[in-house]
Amino acid sequence: LKVRIDVVSIFPEYLAALDLSLIGKARREGLLELAVHDLRDSTHDRHRTVDDTPYGGGAGMVMKPQPWSEALTNIRSQSPAPRPLLVVPSPAGAVFTQAMAYELAEKEHLVFACGRYEGIDERVLEWAAEHFEVRPVSLGDYVLNGGEVAVMAMVEAVGRLVPGVVGNPESLIEESHSDGLLEYPVYTKPAAWDGRDVPEVLLSGNHARIARWRRDEQLRRTAARRPDLISDLAIDDLDPADLGV
Ligand code: ADE
């Protein structure tokens, strides 16, 4: 099951890093078909203008509708999907999570529209809803200069979930957030380093004790660093042994 991803940006070179590492390998192996488009190729004036001043006043510039509708219409016409998903990175979007990454990894065709400046004219999103499933998505509660870095993060998080991209699928099951908890701490050789010993239980060969210790470390860490995740746990996410009973 191949996933097609199109990214539209005024800085296509930003996305060049998606040629590297696991995602680059997945592209070369044909598991992931990823194309990056320059929004300015959809302008028709000598200055290749993509922005203008905001109606109502205020700081900064707003991205004009015409280049976006043209770029997205071209992508839509090439789409294998009846209604591709259009992700619009924005600090005003719903927060991206591992659950959302799993959801996006199931889609046939994802399109990412990287805004810059103060954002894209709102009418583009209204118009796009007639042709795409539109989703404003935020990486988190902080402001980036544009959507490009957010798209790199999302493409990496989604791409690694596409079957065949990560060599050992077990590494997907055991990682942070897959069970609603942070990951347990990990250690490798040597057993003693800088006067610090690897926790004794990990050298014991007792798999039940090791599993219990790791689970306790996950719970302890999550409570300390991310109490919000503990509040979000459903009762079924916990085992009686997690509560010491
Ligand atoms: N663009 C600017 N800030 C962003 C954020 N926090 N998440 C996604 N896209 C953005």
Image: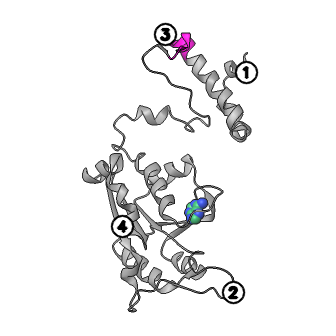
Queried whether the magenta region covers residue 201, the answer comes back as yes
Q: Quadrant of residue 2?
A: bottom left
Query: What element does badge 3 sit on?
Result: helix
The answer to the question of whether label 1 and label 4 lie on touching residues, with beta carbons closer than 8 A, is no
Q: Quadrant of residue 74?
A: bottom left
Residue 36 image label: 4
Queried whether the magenta region covers residue 123, the answer comes back as no
Looking at the rendered structure, the kind of residue marked 3 is Leu
The answer to the question of whether label 1 and label 3 lie on touching residues, with beta carbons closer than 8 A, is no
Query: What element does badge 4 sit on?
Result: strand
Residue 76 in sight from this viewpoint? yes
Q: Position of residue 98 (x, y in %)?
A: 54, 46
Residue 203 image label: 3
Query: What element does badge 1 sit on?
Result: helix
Sequence-wise, which precedes: disc 1 or disc 3? Answer: 3
Q: Which residue is mark 1?
A: 243
What is the CA distance from the residue labelled 1 to the residue labelled 3?
25 Å
Q: Single out the mark in the foreground, 1 or 3.
A: 3
Q: Position of residue 114 (x, y in %)?
A: 49, 69
Q: Residue at x 66, y 24 (%)?
A: 239
Ligand number 1: quarter of image: bottom right
Instruction: For the C terminus, give its image quadrant.
Output: top right
Q: Quadrant of residue 125?
A: bottom right
175 vs 190: above or below: below
What is the CA distance from the residue labelled 3 to the residue labelled 4?
48 Å
Looking at the rendered structure, the kind of residue marked 1 is Leu
